[in-house]
């Protein structure tokens, strides 16, 4: 789950991270009033979308009056911001963040993330933060410093200050960066984050430290431990299909092909997508069914695929074992096909616990499916059914 900048800043502030005063606004009038409430002589108005590169796309504007803040908001709200991360359609701006501007002397890049190659949290930092961090990292990778955290000992002050020294910092500034890292690490662990990126972490002319922009991603699989995050989940930037999948606890990602896919297991699902691609097919989605899914949740997923006008065939791969049985998947398929009122060719590859019961359930309820004997055949049959060769 992606948090908006203003949401991430509010959260990090509770951990002691210094952030400039700011107020979110949904209308130009609210933006005008926000600047007046914040006080000061200059403000930054920033589009709140889940994408980087906002500044280059016109989604970040510095203004010198509250009226100008309202005008800047008016120029953004309701438009679609297109950046390198949004795709050609862009993302509609439904909210802006008005923040006090500050005089920046130095910009630092600081991020905490999960290094999946070693299964540990790591910090990445660079003395050259800001909008061009990707280009700077590519041109001079030696300027990106990495600190891997031992989970047994956690982040210690000595290592944090050493990383600050690598960035060319010393004295009180180095101490402040070490304190900021401690705040980020604590927030990272306690909120089950997969990324907290501060770019830039600014040192002002007065020597103060501020997180000027924050990107934060929380692990979807851990949201059940954080009911307070439900209100942060922004449906405005999620497709109707993804919202429906979220409600039924299905792992779902829309794609551009014409073969609807439902698979029991994320790794197996990725393998199926590769097999379809290798044989000339294109998946319309990634859909992973949880091991504890109910037949009603399976039915909801199948109905999503049936409702997608692009889908010309559906491929279901279920490996029964543990809690989730093949016959549970079959019952969900039968419910969906009866309730949806429309149908496309459906290919089913079932194996493991409940395989025979699954086939019996589908046959007895008159659901027309084609059974595959292995994964390769399943992929090929789905491609042919969707109009491929």
Image: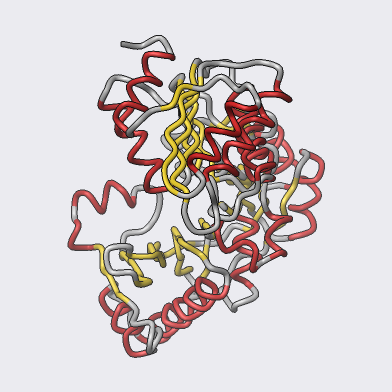
Q: Where is residue 262 in the image (x, y as percent from the top left)?
A: 50, 36
x%, y% of residue 71?
A: 71, 35
* Residue 55 appearing in the image: no
Left or right for 87, reference 327: left
Q: Residue at x 37, y 18 (%)?
A: 383
Residue drawn where x is 80% and y is 45% of the image: 30
Horizontal and vertical percent position of residue 175: 42, 85
Q: Quadrant of residue 246?
A: top right
Residue 104 against residue 50 in the figure, above or below: below
Question: In this rendering, is residue 187 above or below 66?
Answer: below
Q: Quarter of the image containing the C terminus?
A: top left
Please name the colour scheme applied to the rendered image. Answer: secondary structure
At 66% from the left edge and 36% from the top edge, which residue is drawn? 300
Q: Is residue 73 left or right of residue 360?
A: right
Counting labels gives 0
Q: In this view, does 224 lie above or below 326?
A: below
Q: Position of residue 75 (x, y in %)?
A: 66, 31
| Front residue of 119 and 161 | 119
Q: Which image quarter: residue 295?
A: top right
In the rendered image, the vertical position of residue 223 relative to residue 173, given as above or below: above
Q: Nearer the viewer, residue 263 or 183?
A: 263
Horizontal placement of 48 versus 265: left or right? Answer: right
**Closer to the camera in the image, 16 or 114:** 114
Residue at image position (74%, 40%) is 70
Is there any visible trace of residue 257 in the rendered image?
yes
């Amino acid at each position: 789950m992606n948090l908006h900048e203003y949401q991430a800043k509010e959260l990090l502030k509770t951990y002691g991270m210094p952030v400039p005063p700011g107020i979110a606004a949904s209308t130009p009038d609210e933006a005008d009033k926000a600047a007046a409430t914040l006080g000061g002589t200059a403000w930054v108005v920033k589009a709140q979308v889940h994408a980087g590169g906002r500044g280059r796309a016109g989604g970040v504007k510095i203004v010198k009056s509250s009226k100008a803040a309202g005008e800047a908001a008016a120029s953004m709200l309701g438009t679609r911001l297109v950046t390198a991360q949004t795709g050609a359609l862009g993302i509609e701006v439904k909210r802006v963040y008005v923040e006090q501007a500050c005089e920046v002397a130095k910009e630092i890049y600081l991020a905490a993330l999960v290094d999946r190659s070693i299964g540990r949290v790591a910090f990445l930092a660079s003395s050259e933060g800001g909008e061009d961090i990707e280009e700077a990292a590519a041109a001079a990778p030696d300027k990106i410093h990495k600190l891997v955290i031992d989970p047994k000992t956690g982040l210690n002050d000595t290592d944090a200050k050493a990383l600050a020294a690598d960035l060319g910092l010393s004295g009180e500034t180095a101490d402040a960066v070490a304190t900021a890292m401690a705040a980020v690490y604590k927030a990272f662990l306690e909120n089950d984050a997969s990324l907290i990126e501060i770019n830039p972490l600014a040192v002002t002319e007065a020597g103060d430290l501020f997180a000027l922009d924050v990107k934060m991603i929380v692990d979807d699989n851990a949201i059940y431990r954080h009911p307070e995050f439900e209100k942060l989940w922004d449906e405005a930037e999620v497709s109707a299909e993804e919202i429906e999948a979220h409600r039924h606890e299905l792992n779902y990602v829309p794609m551009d092909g014409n073969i609807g896919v439902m698979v029991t297991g994320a790794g197996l699902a990725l393998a199926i997508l590769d097999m379809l691609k290798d044989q000339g097919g294109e998946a319309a989605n990634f859909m992973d069914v949880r091991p504890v899914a109910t037949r009603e949740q399976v039915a909801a997923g199948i109905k999503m695929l049936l409702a997608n006008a692009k889908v010309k065939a559906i491929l279901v791969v279920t490996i029964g074992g543990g809690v989730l049985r093949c016959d549970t998947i079959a019952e969900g398929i039968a419910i969906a096909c009866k309730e949806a009122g429309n149908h496309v060719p459906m290919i089913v590859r079932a194996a493991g616990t409940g395989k025979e019961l699954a086939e019996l359930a589908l046959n007895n309820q008159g659901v027309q499916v084609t059974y595959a004997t292995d994964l390769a055949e399943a992929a090929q049959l789905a491609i042919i059914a969707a109009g491929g060769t």
